[in-house]
Amino acid sequence: MKVGIVMGSASDRPVMAGASEILNDFDVEHEVKILSAHRTPAALQQWVESLRDRGFAAVIAAAGGAAHLAGVVAAFTTLPVIGVPVKSRSLEGIDSLLSMVQMPSGIPVACVAIDGSKNAALLAIEIMAVTDISLRDKLADFRAKQAANVLAANESQD
């Protein structure tokens, strides 16, 4: 199973690097594309409609501003779509967040925090781990390491 990552602009790459990092850490194959819901709608539709046949299990879609990308992706597929609102200059990402969480009934988009690409990748992994035992085990290890790191911080206090 693979995860698609799509962003509306090359300027979103720094935010989305975190998603690729997490997917690499879990050995999850992924494909990254820059496609715009507004400037390249035909290319976006073609890419999205090819995903299921190519073995993809989920799509992470990042956009700032009006942030229609995740909703348009969701309109073209029944794969789970996870939106990452990207912090914008004018409204600090609130506009992007609201664009993603206010999807009309019947076309769901899961949404993580503003600039939350790592959590988007983890959510995609959790979705795949429902049927993939190896990913389920890796997630359990990841969570155990997180807990250990928090508890270890108590020991290093002065």
Image (cartoon, grey):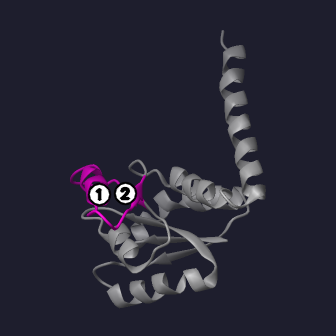
Q: Is mark 2 on a helix, strand or loop?
A: loop
- Badges 2 and 1: C-beta atoms under 8 Å apart? yes
Q: Locate residue 96: give its quadrant.
A: bottom left
Q: Where is residue 34 in the image (x, y as percent from the top left)?
A: 45, 77
Residue type at mark 1 is: Ser
Residue farthest to the top, as pictured: 158
Residue 86's label in the rendered image is 2
Q: In the rendered view of the protein, which quadrant contains the C terminus?
A: top right
Q: Where is residue 95 in the image (x, y as percent from the top left)?
A: 24, 55
Q: Count all numbered tags in the image, as a single digit.
A: 2
Can residue 66 be seen from the camera position used here? yes
- Magenta segment: 83-111
Q: Mark 1 highlights which residue?
A: 96
Q: Residue at x 62, y 57 (%)?
A: 125
Crowding at label 2, few (<14), some or many (≥20) Cα neighbours within 10 Å?
many
Residue type at mark 2 is: Val
Residue farthest to the front, as pictured: 106
Asked whether, in this view, residue 2 is left or right of residue 63, the answer is right
Residue 144: say if magenta: no
Q: In the rendered view of the protein, which quadrant contains the N terminus?
A: bottom right
Q: Position of residue 44 (x, y in %)?
A: 41, 83
Q: Residue at x 28, y 62 (%)?
A: 103
Q: Which of 75 and 4 is in front in this view?
A: 75
Q: State how far apart marks 2 and 1 are (Cα).
A: 6 Å
Residue 106: say if magenta: yes
Lower position in the chain sequence, tag 2 or tag 1? 2
